[in-house]
Amino acid sequence: LQAQTVKRLSNLSSSKIETNPQNCCVLQSFPGNNSMKMTDPVWNSSRPAGSHPANLFLNNPPNFAMPSAQLQPSPANFLPPPLSSVNTAVPKSTTSLVQGSVPSFPVPSGLPSMNGLVQPPNLSTFRSEDLFTDVALSPPVTAAPVTNVAQAVSNFSSSTVGKTFLPLLPLPDDPHFVKQHVPPPTVHPSGRSMSSVSGHGIGSSPISEVQHNFAGLQYPISSPINAIIPDMGNLNLNAVSPTRTAVVDLLQEKHPIPSECLEPPVVTLPRPYDRDLESSDSSVLRCTLAAVPESPSVLKKCRLPLGLIVHPFKDLKKLVMVETSIIVRCRSCRAYINPYVRFVDRNWNCNICGRANRLPDEFYYNPQTGKVGDPSLRPEIQNSSIEFIAPAHEYENRPPQPACYIFILDVSARAVQSGYLVIFRDVLLESLRLLPGDNRTIIGFIAVDSFLHFFQLRENLKPKEFVVSDVDDIVMPSKSFLLFYLDDSINAVESFLNDLPERFADNTDPKCALGSAITAGFELIATIGGRLTVFQTVLPDIGNGSLTSREDPNLRAAKEVTNMSAASDFYKNLALKCTERMIAVDLFVLGDTYVDLATVCDVVTFSSGSVYYYPNFDACSNPMEMERFRSDLGRYLRRKIGFEAVMRIRLSYGLSVHSFFGNFFVCSSNMAKLSNVNPDSAFGVLLNLDDNIDQPVVCIQAAVLYSTCHGQRRIRVHTICLPTSESILEIHNAADLPAIIALISRMAVDRCLYQQGTIQMAREASVNAVVDCLYAFRSASASREYGTLLCSRNMRLFPIFILALLKCKAFAHGYSIKLDHRISAMLQFKIMPISNMILELHPNLYALHAISETNPNAPLLPLSFEKIDRHGLYLMDTGRYMYLYVGPGISDTLCKSMFGVNSYKEINSMTVNLENDNAINEHGMLIYNFMRSIISDRLQKVPVRIINVYNFREDSPSKELFLTHLIEDRSETSFSYVEFLNFLQKEICGK
């Protein structure tokens, strides 16, 4: 075959080269076109050369496997019921529709709506030789409104009629368009699998048969075409040669170690999409698959979930802000202009729906140079994440709300004993002048036990307290007495806070009317909007929303956990009222007393709030929880906040939103309403692949419209572009493991809390996800070796993360876990950013004793006690906690360096404060510097979160806290990692 190919390529422009009839592949060339196609009889379609998995120049042509039995899709293990579908009205010229759902919640007036999507226009007249070359880009600046540029734009445009500006997105009807092969990412990600078809079966068999894709095929190492045949130097394949798939036998990796930074996979886009942007942060919008399947059938065969993890309000190092009189948007789908649109003459083609839109004259103006020129140099085209200052006349139907903060404080006897009021006072006094807002900022306080306590604070006057004893039918004092501007009363607020702990120090009332207090807070700011910050220590047992204990301590270790759903709809209905008035509720739960978090949390989850849980909180006896509460509260009070926000997801044709996961209210098929939005919350989105995708890429855009604390309306827009692929192996190689794990955990929580599911059903679904993934990869790959458990290298950590999910507090069974502890862990998974979740499931374990002057970084160890030496010093970083494990045989020298004591027995301190320099000598300094470097690196993602390290010894009861995170070891009720791999192998071989 190679000899025949060399011989016949000598006259490529006018000849047609064919292989022997039994040789499966036909190479064709066409006069006047420098593209080469390869015809595959099995696929019965023409494909660009280089995109076929087989190499044309193999000496022995591969034997292609015929399609196996039709795939029998298994029920989706986690999928919630899809949103009800309605057809969107589309103009008559529209050739396709995107279906969505519109729940009964009304969309706020004045907000942009989603119209129908249309097919791209025919661009067959486009000429590739008319392309303009991209030029060097300069940092964008704020775009001021442009005046008197219409004539300049007209002159500029008339000289470029018929020209096309980069970025250029060719469409299939372009005669020069050749679809490229999508190479796998080059950076280590990881992948996982789960059913993507509709259904709710949890314990069913994952899949039966998967088509064997190119059985026996061995991928050659890609080589430059010019090095293979010199005569092909002028041949433009416009494709990337396939690379070898890195296959790992999991049974040979008994102790996997995740890399310290599990970054998103590098997305390799075909030309001309692969353009350099001035700023791009892929962590704000991550897709579980960096290569999107071309059809629903391919997605089913891959057994991988298709979804998004959206972190829309993340603190970004660089976020370009644009102020302009006109925000350019598609007239059809209302997508915002972005780096992946196409400019043709004075129009731009939307990369979401394909519609041609007129480009405003102002968009030709470059605010940095002050000249009229190439629109592709605008900041909107140079940044994948951008923030617009919205014109008031277009995005405001009322003045933006002021920043309004109401604090609802539990002052029952248990709350007073815990000592949290002292910490609350200290932190709020430190943050009072740093609260986000302006001179319109409003503040108020409500205290609650068996009664409701309201406070009137005025400058130069003593605080007045109003007590309401009837908590079932609340008669509130005048709002003008209870709300006040912070700037006008800041001295009075400081005086009130200083006296707060002493005011209730002698309170012996054990009851708490929490439901009535939240209702009062809602009524107080219903006409304004804002945030209710609630502190709770005991079960609400009086007044509106009163509850009774549902926890049976004898059933904590049962296989099936009960009472995970709400006992009453009171808190959910209250949350819906808050959402309608743009009020968010955040809840701080302190102490180990049962509070029925499964019921109370509804007021948080449906109002876009957050839950913070501190078990065993006591300001005196538990300094670790005290310091975590202090740092969390400080971060909470000072961080950036957005009010009255809505988030909309826009997708290319063929994709649609199936479900949202997070704390918000879904008000249409692709839009969620967020009363408040903060930089520490991320959301999950499960996608449907409804139709075949005939484009080389798909585009996804997430836009958040919100009000700043200074009363300004803004739109933050994130856009990503992903290649498409029909190769199962390529899609597996492009899977993003952290995003997949984050999506699976959110779906499992949703199944348990809101779909009447059980812990056991969620556990079985998680295991089925791994079995599906590994079986699909095994069926698509060439290897059939006995006694192996194969996966692609970037998916090798999938089993260990699923095992960690099974052993975490949210989904573990077989040992005693308090119900509130379990529910709080689930609620954290719902909103946790990917980086935090990875550490929560698989902590980092460092051998600190190995640090030296020549090696200042501690090695990372597997999570197994087998790796723990009794003479060592180990640091375990779980994200929210850090544990310092001191081996009983630690040397006296290391004790002296770290703790300033002469021996192990003299270590009495329970904590190590990394803010202070505790090192005695240079070796101790190196260890402390390493520990600080871990925290400083994380502070870039979660600022101002200070972590104190908990210290315990070998014979301490706290050792159990350390051992429960060693997920590779066997426990009384769960597999070890090696046993789990053997179980997976048995399940796959039994198919």
Image (cartoon, helix red, strand yellow):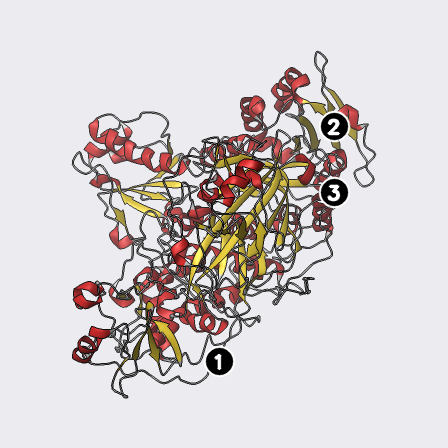
Q: Percent position (x, y) of residue 435?
A: 58, 27
The mark closer to the camera, 2 or 3, is 2
Q: Give the quarter of the figure containing the C terminus.
A: bottom left
Q: Nearer the viewer, residue 124 or 392?
A: 124
Q: Amino acid at mark 2?
A: Phe
Q: CA gap, disc 2 to disc 1?
A: 63 Å
Give coordinates of residue 592: x percent, y percent: 55, 43
The mark that comes first in sequence, 2 or 1, is 1
Q: Residue tagged by mark 1?
A: 72
Work out whether 139 lies above or below 820. Answer: above
Q: Position of residue 816 (x, y in %)?
A: 49, 55
Instruction: Please name the residue shown 27% across and 47% down the image.
Output: 860
Binning the other alpha carbons within 10 Å of mark 3 as few (below 14), some (14 to 19) or many (20 upward) gives many
Q: Residues within 10 Å of mark 2 (few under 14, many from 20)?
A: many
- Give the Cα distance between marks 3 and 1: 54 Å
Q: Earlier in the sequence, mark 3 or mark 1?
A: 1
Note whether 91 is above or below 874 in the view shown.
below
Question: Which of the two residues, 980 or 20, is positioned nearer the viewer here?
Answer: 20
Q: Is residue 582 above or below residue 433?
A: below
- The residue beneath circle 3 is 542
Pointer 2: what residue? 454
Residue contact at pointers 3 and 1, CB within 8 angstroms: no
Specify whether 446 is left or right of 317. right
SS at mark 2? strand
Q: Which element type, helix, strand or loop, lies under badge 1?
A: loop
The kind of residue on which mark 3 rests is Ile
